[in-house]
Image (cartoon, helix red, strand yellow):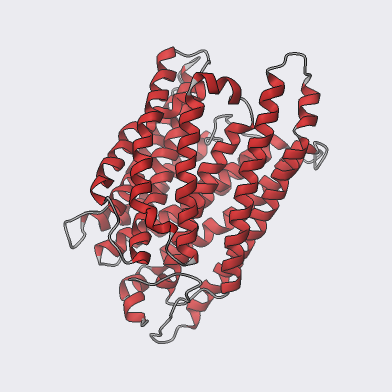
Amino acid sequence: MTMKSEYSPTDAASRWPLMLLIISGASWLVLAGVFALISSIQLHTPSFMALCPVFTYGRGVAIAETAFVYGWLANAGLALALWVLMRLSGEPLRAQNWALGGWTFWNLGVLGAIIGLGLGDLTGFELLELPGYIQLILFFSYAAIAIPGLLAWSGRLRRVSFASHWYAAAALFLFPWLLSIVHVMLFSAPVRGVLQPIVAGWYAQSVWTLVLAPLALSIAYFVVPKVTGKVLPSYEFASLGFWCLILVGGLTGGRHLVGGPVPAWIASVAVVSCALLFFHTFVVLLNLRGAFTAPGVAVKFIAFGVAAYVLGAVFDTVTSFHVVAVQTQFTYFDEAQKQLALYGAATTILFGGIYFAVPRITGKAWLSPLLVRGHLMLSLLGIMLLVISLCAAGATQSHDLLDAKVPFATITAHTRDSLVGVTAAELILLLGNICFLANFYGTACEILKISSPATFSPSSAMETPAS
């Protein structure tokens, strides 16, 4: 395969904003893994690093979540969304200085948020532990990074649009809107009483359904047909699946409030919305089922992510019903669902997108195919062990919590073995992510050695080329 088919002047002209976003995201991912590992150890060994305030469980979990969602998922997702929109437009990214400026202030904002969290400035809202003074920085930074992508979408050479267009553009539009609303309602002019958990639940669910999931799906819809060399099956339903997610996804946040002191209709709407959203998930499965039979590391990551996305939708629907929520609420089942979505689905799809995109952005194959395969095995093993261990801990916790005679100390003792499994999973994932970061740094450094156009041929162990 020649460079002409894989590496174009379009990629070369737009390389640096994309690489900077990915490399900063990968760095935040490792930092998130370190704090997640420390926090998981504290679940079964509370004395571990208990004398260091920065590493206490509450602060450690908030730092890990912030670094993971706003450091890793946002940086990597934005990089791939820009790359997909650029590739589909057929032209280099315009207004790249906006993306570079946005990247700078976004990561400074994430760093400031983590410092604030380390000092104890937490908000207590899920996926929104960010101190209020950081949120406006992230709002304007995200908008700046989104400008080149929206210009690529609106100025594409062919007026026809694809599913990758829809999902990427939606994520670029919707996050600033979500953050501005929640900032006003919870920080600038905070609502009172029961409205606060309603707004916080809506934001947490919307960040997943309207931002992170679309970012991941945009790259999946782009890579799978490229790798398989075939038109996506049942593609005529893709637009229906997209609009189902956009119109219904934000209404599912009330499932976290089942049985709580909120109007009953909020939980009822969430239950119905979860059931309706399964139509979107079914369409995604129909469209992307070719990923399960295609060869290559990139598409294997995506196939695992699609499977986790479908399984997570089933979990969300089942646990939204009151009869099941009574058993699963306030247990580790909630954390298992979150990890299945954020790590099992979004992260693995982004990994697949990065493994597919980076050789085309840099013109260089991955430095170490061994590290690529090691990362694949460690990631899939770690995610499965993490989710299974959390579900096992949740099942034990649920059984004991329903018995008023069982003291809390006994419940903690019963879940200890499962939580040790969580720690093992976090360690495996951290090792895999270190492999990924080291390989990416090495591959990025190879760019500096390019003195003239060259060729690269991704090995069959990496992917089946179809560009």
Q: Is residue 200 visible?
A: no
Relative to 379, is 134 above or below? Answer: above
Q: Seen from this angle, which residue lies furthest front?
A: 293
* Residue 171 x %, y %: 36, 45
- Determine which quarter of the picture holds residue 299: bottom left
Q: Which residue is found at the position 51% from the left and 37% from the top? A: 133
* Image quadrant where one finds the N terminus: bottom left
Q: Quadrant of the C terminus?
A: bottom left
Residue 150 lies left or right of residue 52; in this view the side is left
Residue 5 image position (x, y, % from top left): 32, 77
| Most foreground residue, 403 or 108 | 403
Camera-side residue: 420 or 161?
Answer: 420
Residue 399 % position (x, y):
69, 23
What residue is rendered at 74% in x and 37% in y? 43
Against 384, residue 121 (above or below) is above
Q: Nearer the viewer, residue 283 or 258?
A: 283
Number of numbered tags placed on the structure image: 0
- Tell me residue 93's x, y (percent): 31, 63
Viewer-proximal residue among 320 and 125? 320
